[in-house]
Amino acid sequence: MPPLFSAPALHRRRLLRHAAAFALVLLAVALLFLLLVHPRSLGTPSPSPSYGHRLPTLVDLTLVHGAKEKGAVCLDGTPPGYHWLPGFGDGSNKWLLHLEGGSWCRNRTSCDHRKKTSLGSSAYMETRVEFVGILSDDKAQNPDFYNWNKVKIRYCDGASLSGNVQDEHQYGATFFFRGQRIWEAVMAELLPKGLARAKQAFLTGCSAGGLSTYIHCDDFRALLPKDSTVKCLADGGFFLDVEDISGRRYMRGFYNDVARQQDLRKRFPGCSSDMEPGQCFFPQEVAKGITTPMFILNPAYDVWQVEHVLTPDGSDPQNLWQDCRMDITKCNAKQLEILQGFRKSLLDAISEFKKKRGWGMFIDSCFIHCQSMKSLAWHSPSASRINNKTVAEAVGDWFFDRREVKEIDCEYPCNPTCFNVVLEQPYQEG
């Protein structure tokens, strides 16, 4: 009887068996690699982009109770939300609140778009968020505030928590411009949770949330015991009322639209009547009336402002700034000259606040936006420094009165410690 398989066929079958076994070994090695090196791909949290050894804490979203009855709702009528991480140890009676940023909406089109995002509706908000930077509970990343109660207040009203328009019928559609009511409703919920008994309290915010911090700093102080220490910090929120590269005041026009739409002039009664409504919304004007100690944290070459204030849509038809606005190392000599002029405008605008007793500032010469909410920029070996102090160290020194902190960096590119971002695509929100 002839053999079932010829010698070549048997050889091929052995090769196939060896190949299959080898493939199984490779698969096992790959799975082991994923488990050890890339845990996120198997459904576990990934490490924060920081130098610490702990994964960032995930904090659940809480929707404000009874918000709809108070009319304190997001653009689409859903209740607003916040994330609260309780304090521990000697931080259990200390509170740090952070107001989320995210630009503004100026008309029906942009507000309608926001209603379908987390910046206009709690229906789209993440149910859990990572607490990093100034919100971190890791002492290595956040040495002065790690064990405090920390609250991230979500932004969903389109005007830095400042509007209060009773009529929700706008432009033939439904929009709720109720930021002021959201602020009041969130405070009313947090006060009985322990905020009302805070020994130390710190209101912070980033970008549009930084502007909210200027707006609500004194309101926050008024809610708390007179013998408690209360201070505020605005990160990347000192937006400038300056001409763009085409000679227009684009940002003033933008703020005029926001202010008219949400009837904001009544929110700023101290603003001069001969000013355009949008002018009253700029931090330089809002901050003039603040009596609570305030810390101005701003890069001199704020990435968001370079794109949206200095080179906004329509100002650069030939796209000469396309590379520069994404990566400061790609700016030519003429562009750098304009950026130095922008820095000077910032320094001129904050000069009156530099004289205010109890105020602090950290103006680094870096190309970044919102440094308090980035682990690497807030406090790490690669963080930007002025006089060998990270942002976190400078803010802590100021808050606890360890020294006066009014740090203003030299011109770019003088600071070798700068943590400069390189954008892969333009910023869309603030």
Image (spheres, rainbow, N blue to C red):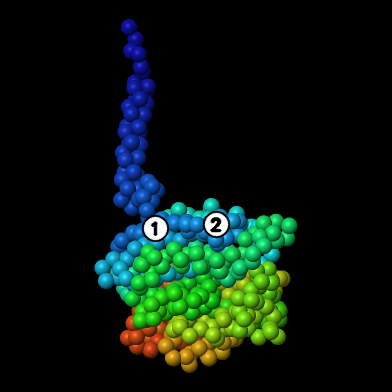
Vertical placement of 30 versus 89: above or below? above
Most extreme residue toward the left is 89
SS at circle 1? strand
- Find disc 1 in the rendering and name its residue: 59
| Residue closest to the eye, 412 or 315 | 315
Question: Which residue sits at x=44%, y=75%?
Answer: 223
Question: Which residue sits at x=65%, y=69%?
Answer: 262
SS at circle 2? helix
- Find disc 2 in the rendering and name its residue: 68
Question: Which residue sits at x=54%, y=76%?
Answer: 215
Left or right: 318 in relation to 414: right
Query: Can residue 153 be seen?
Result: no
Mark 1 in CB contact with mark 2 (< 8 angstroms):
no
The kind of residue on which mark 1 rests is Val
Q: Position of residue 166 (x, y in %)?
A: 64, 64
Q: CA distance from mark 1 to mark 2?
A: 23 Å
Vertical placement of 355 versus 123: above or below? below
| Residue closest to the eye, 309 or 294 | 294
Left or right: 382 in relation to 413: left
Quadrant of the snapshot with the N terminus:
top left
Most extreme residue toward the top is 1
Q: Position of residue 155 (x, y in %)?
A: 53, 64
Q: Position of residue 72 (x, y in %)?
A: 55, 62
Vertical placement of 192 versus 39: above or below? below
> Which dot, 1 or 2, sits closer to the camera?
2
